[in-house]
Image (spheres, coloured by chain):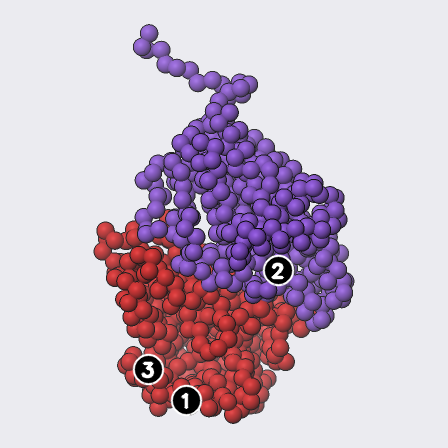
Chain colours: A red, B purple
Amino acid sequence: MTDIKPISPPRSMPGSRIKTGIVMMNLGGPATLDDVEPFLLELFADREIIQLPLQRWLGPFIARRRTPKVRSLYAGIGGGSPILRYTEAQGRGMVARLDRISPETAPHKSYVAFRYTYPRSDDALRAMQADGVERAVAFTQYPQFSCSTTGSSLNELWRAAARTGLSHSFEWSIIDRWPVHQGFIAAMTETVRDGMEQFEPADRDKVLILFSAHSLPLDVIDRGDAYPQEVGASAQRVVEQLGRSNPYILAYQSDVGPVRWLGPSTEQVLRRLGARGHKHVLVVPIAFTTDHIETLSELDQEYGEVAHQAGITHYKRAPALNERPLFLDGLAQIVRDHLASGLAHSSQYPTRCAGCTNPQCRNILNPVSPGAGAPRLPA
Amino acid sequence: MTDIKPISPPRSMPGSRIKTGIVMMNLGGPATLDDVEPFLLELFADREIIQLPLQRWLGPFIARRRTPKVRSLYAGIGGGSPILRYTEAQGRGMVARLDRISPETAPHKSYVAFRYTYPRSDDALRAMQADGVERAVAFTQYPQFSCSTTGSSLNELWRAAARTGLSHSFEWSIIDRWPVHQGFIAAMTETVRDGMEQFEPADRDKVLILFSAHSLPLDVIDRGDAYPQEVGASAQRVVEQLGRSNPYILAYQSDVGPVRWLGPSTEQVLRRLGARGHKHVLVVPIAFTTDHIETLSELDQEYGEVAHQAGITHYKRAPALNERPLFLDGLAQIVRDHLASGLAHSSQYPTRCAGCTNPQCRNILNPVSPGAGAPRLPA
């Protein structure tokens, strides 16, 4: 009987063992208005994104004080964030494509791990265990790396593995950034073209493209965070793909509080463009993959009002990537290329920021092929 | 006799009329120690790069106070800046190649226009007139655009044309930026490979690549200067060309004075990398095309000492592009592609920074094909 080889179950068989589990990591957002306060409490407790004096007291204080305003913002976009719905749809679309283009790693399944709301890393890990996953990919949904986004999510994932007793259950690799992956750039370029379609054909030559990314406090930049370099590279690549492009600007949104943030500020740029007589602006969210409060509320409503006041008569936003088929193709290509590389992470991942102040970062649990892509430099 | 057509003189004929004049614009540098003070006086008088209260008095005061220190820095690199010698050699190498790869625009000739020392824009324009140039290209030697570098040089060029009575003498186009042109990226990538060769083969995996670009005050960034976005794109493209690259960081050097500049600071990054135990660093000047005080003195000597003190035992610098044949090829390709496009400038050029405070900028004199690439947006 030794010549009889075990037969793999067919991929489509119900209950078949998942070969590759893919954890879609993102910020997350409150699904209902009652989730706003717990979401903010988690956010202001994360010292990897916000460092406050007496954080254990001041964090909850600020979170509770901001809750009514943030609740009203979520009420203004339909009563909650659509990020879970989109992330789940992206995962399904990606997995369906991956099963086709990477049969050797199939069947695949996606799991959502949000940083500040459910489903959390703990939920994703338990579900993966229940499905019998052995090979796991931590896939950041932030195209450009920052310690305050992808870094924080990864550190939380490893902590959750320890909390759930699953530190040794999976063989891990990380997709820690994809700022210029062609699968991302092609889809982002398509959103810009779609955005341009919202203008009258005769007006399209007059449109200024305003790429907008979430800002970071300058202290994070000065420590050496890779984010602005990678955002700059993404914007350049999209413009190249557009061919002879309209003029463009890269600006940064959502700065808050008393410290100085990376500029130029999207809001201030809009005011100044209006003052200078620009009438046609297309804003393009270059560092987000789904609609959420920063697009639906801040860009569309708040900055839409700023633009209107400033005399920008034609202010439009490029659609978010959301469930765009070309983006689902892109997500699948990013994972396929990563799996085919055999690497545990990018060559950038192990190197901490020069000014790193975080005792826990740039780790990986049970890396696949420990030799490949493992840290070679002092931590 | 009407059927006899005029015969163009052969290209190689001595004294033949120059068909295309190419103005190589750069900062410049003092050629001798006695040129240091006049150079600094010009620099501190340029409100497009430095804005001081009571500039007409405070500028000369600061320039004269800094002269002894800066003289000693130039003394330490051989008594003067090599930037003129390199720029002239780059021009010659570029023109020889252009005559071959773009015969329809030949003969070409290059002219140097430095911003703060001789030869100045006035000198370049008079030489072009003497040579009978009609078609002129203003070619910035800063790969990435900033209003404080390329912008200031262009504005000075148009002022010089007015001063010399040559405002109507040439038909102009501008090469205002080339941050990801393949001709530039290929040559820059070669310098990184050459830089890596300075390390022992066994050590090369341990090398951290530190791209360093000249910094800018944050006020310039907040106005919407394109520079950091384009520098980020250049660094990304070089890393892509390297293939599976060593880890890298982008940092900014040469900040001075009391205002806050764009970070992370190259000097501080070196201190912190050393403190973290990094022993092998290759610094790559990503925004300069020739050796000058910022490479030979600041990177090699000053930061070399910083690195040594910090415990970075193997601190090397990638060579500047200088007369590297692949870079001369690149310069020629950039000009050929520009001439073949028929455009007067990039689509980015006409759009002022959102927070522009300069009444004179983003102009062009007598643009070639006024329709193509001319400003379409409010100035």
| Mark toward the viewer: 1 or 2 | 2
Outermost residue on the top side: it is: B1
Residue designated by label 2: B256
Chain on which label 1 sits: A
Asked if disc 1 and disc 2 are in contact, CB closer than 8 Å, the reply is no
Q: Quadrant of the N terminus of chain B?
A: top left
Residue drawn at point x = 56 percent, y = 30 percent: B96
Q: Are marks 3 and 1 on the same chain?
A: yes
Q: Position of residue A158 (x, y in %)?
A: 56, 82
Please state if B276 lies on the left or on the right of A109 as rendered.
Answer: right
Q: Position of residue B304 (x, y in %)?
A: 73, 58
Question: Is A14 located above or below residue B50 in the figure?
Answer: below
Residue B203 tag number:
none
CA gap, disc 3 and disc 1: 16 Å
Question: Is label 2 in a helix, a strand or a loop?
Answer: loop
Q: Quick check: do tags 1 and 2 share a chain?
A: no
Q: Which mark is residue A74?
A: 3
Q: Give the label, 3 or 1, closer to the camera.
A: 1
Specify whether residue A347 is in view.
yes
Type of residue at label 3?
Tyr
Q: What residue does disc 1 label?
A: A65
What residue is at 44 percent from the left and 73 percent from the top? Answer: A255
Q: Residue at x 42, y 48 (%)?
A: B360
Q: Chain of mark 3?
A: A
